[in-house]
């Protein structure tokens, strides 16, 4: 099965929904309920946007992406999965669709509905309570929202690869690796800034906005390439597993 068949990909997706739709509904219900019961932290100012619990969403994204190939850690489940009549590329494509394009939107939708419900309850409990809308992200511009999407994709790609690479406790091990890498990156950036500052290359006020755009475009490109890189690594790791 070297060629990609969209029919087989559809069958894999159908198989997933048949086996896991109840679990997905439970997770969506948990996110919805959490948003309902959490008390608005900006209750002192009744004109602020209702916040969404992005920390909880990121935890759910990571857990889902980390278990998407989790069956490979169990011999019996791994044999059943690897024997499915589909190619490695079709299995990987199916899981990319689930972890990147299915699970994040449904969880965000559940969170959004929960925030609406919370806002409705607050209007009943507090006479002077009003809301100007819902804060979809921590950011204020479409560009910053685009960064959030890239972060979600990159995180899910890393977690998906970790679920194949680590045979046991893949989620925990992958999160630890991500944390160590993020910490090392922060230290590296901090050291570079100190070196450049001492060398006189750091300017407090950047006069040329195009410089910021150039740096931002480099960052976007790196994040996209890194995401695709982990997709490719996942493919070859899945290939080694099947062998």
Image (spheres, rainbow, N blue to C red):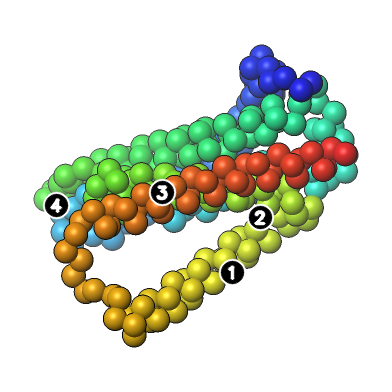
Q: Secondary structure at mark 4?
A: loop
- Number of numbered discs overlaid on the protein picture: 4
Mark 2 lies on residue: 171
Residue 124 visible? The answer is no
86 to 130, vertically: above or below: above
Q: Are marks 2 and 1 in contact (CB under 8 Å)?
A: no
Q: What distance separates the C-alpha of mark 1 from that of mark 3?
A: 22 Å
Most extreme residue toward the top, as rendered?
7
Observer-nearest of 167 and 120:
167
Assess disc 3: are there few (<14), some (14-19) or many (≥20) residues with their C-alpha within 10 Å of its C-alpha. some
**Quadrant housing the N terminus:** top right
Nearer the camera: disc 2 or disc 3: 3
- Does dot 1 land on a helix, a strand or a loop? helix
Q: Quadrant of residue 84?
A: top right
**Location of mark 4 (residue):** 47
| Residue at which label 3 appears | 220
Residue 225's spot in the image, x, y percent? 52, 46
Q: Measuring 47% from the left and 51% from the top, which residue is drawn there?
A: 222
Q: Residue at x 23, y 53 (%)?
A: 210
Task: Tell me which residue sits at (63%, 63%) in the image.
Answer: 177
Residue annotated with mark 1: 180
The circle on residue 55 is none
- Residue at the far bottom in the pictured view: 198
């Amino acid at each position: 099965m070297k060629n990609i068949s969209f029919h087989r990909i559809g069958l894999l997706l159908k198989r997933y929904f048949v086996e896991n739709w109840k679990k997905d509904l439970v997770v969506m219900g948990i996110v919805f309920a959490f948003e309902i019961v959490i008390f608005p932290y900006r209750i002192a100012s009744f004109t602020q946007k209702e916040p969404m619990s992005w920390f909880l969403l990121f935890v759910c994204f990571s857990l889902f992406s980390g278990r998407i190939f989790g069956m490979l850690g169990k011999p019996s489940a791994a044999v059943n999965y690897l024997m499915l009549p589909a190619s490695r590329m079709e299995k990987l494509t199916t899981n990319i669709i689930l972890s990147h394009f299915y699970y994040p939107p449904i969880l965000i939708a559940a969170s959004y509905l929960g925030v609406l419900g919370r806002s409705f309850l607050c209007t009943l409990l507090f006479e002077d309570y009003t809301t100007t809308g819902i804060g979809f992200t921590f950011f204020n511009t479409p560009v910053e929202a685009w960064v959030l999407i890239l972060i979600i994709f990159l995180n899910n790609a890393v977690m998906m690869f970790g679920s194949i690479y680590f045979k046991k406790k893949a989620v925990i091990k992958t999160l630890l690796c991500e944390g160590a890498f993020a910490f090392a990156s922060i230290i590296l950036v901090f050291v570079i800034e100190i070196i450049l500052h001492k060398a006189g290359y750091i300017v407090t006020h950047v006069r040329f906005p195009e410089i910021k755009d150039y740096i931002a475009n480099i960052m976007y490109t790196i994040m996209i390439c890194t995401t695709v890189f982990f997709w490719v690594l996942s493919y070859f790791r899945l290939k080694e597993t099947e062998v």
